[in-house]
Amino acid sequence: MEKYGSKPEHFAKIAWKNHKHSVNNPYSQFQDEYTLEQIQNSPMIHYPLTKLQC
């Protein structure tokens, strides 16, 4: 993150986009659509990743 100036919000936006696509995939781990806020506020697994980003 330091090398490229990435922020936790960038990772959350990637997860949000992926969750939008997973709604149409019957084999995806998470088949629900989540908001950006839900992704950012889900339980922290290891900084900066939350449960819904894994």
Image: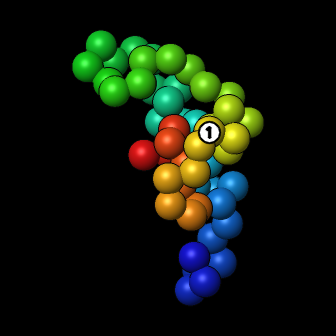
Res. 29 image quadrant: top left
Q: Is residue 34 left or right of residue 19?
A: right
Residue 41 seen:
yes
Per the image, the residue denoted by label 1 is 42
Q: x, y (%) of residue 45?
A: 50, 53
Residue 36 seen:
no
Instruction: Give the structural element (helix, strand or loop) at label 1.
Output: loop
Residue drawn at 50 percent across, 60 percent down: 46
Q: x, y (%) of residue 7?
A: 67, 66
Say which quadrant the N terminus sits in: bottom right
Q: Is residue 53 above or below residue 22?
A: below
Callout count: 1
Amino acid on which the number 1 mark rests in the picture: Ser
Q: Is residue 45 above or below residue 42?
A: below
Q: Is residue 10 left or right of residue 32?
A: right
Q: What residue occupies the far bottom of the structure in this picture?
A: 3
Q: Is residue 52 left or right of residue 40?
A: left
Q: x, y (%) of residue 44?
A: 57, 51
Residue drawn at 58 percent across, 62 percent down: 48
Q: Is residue 8 above or below residue 14?
A: below
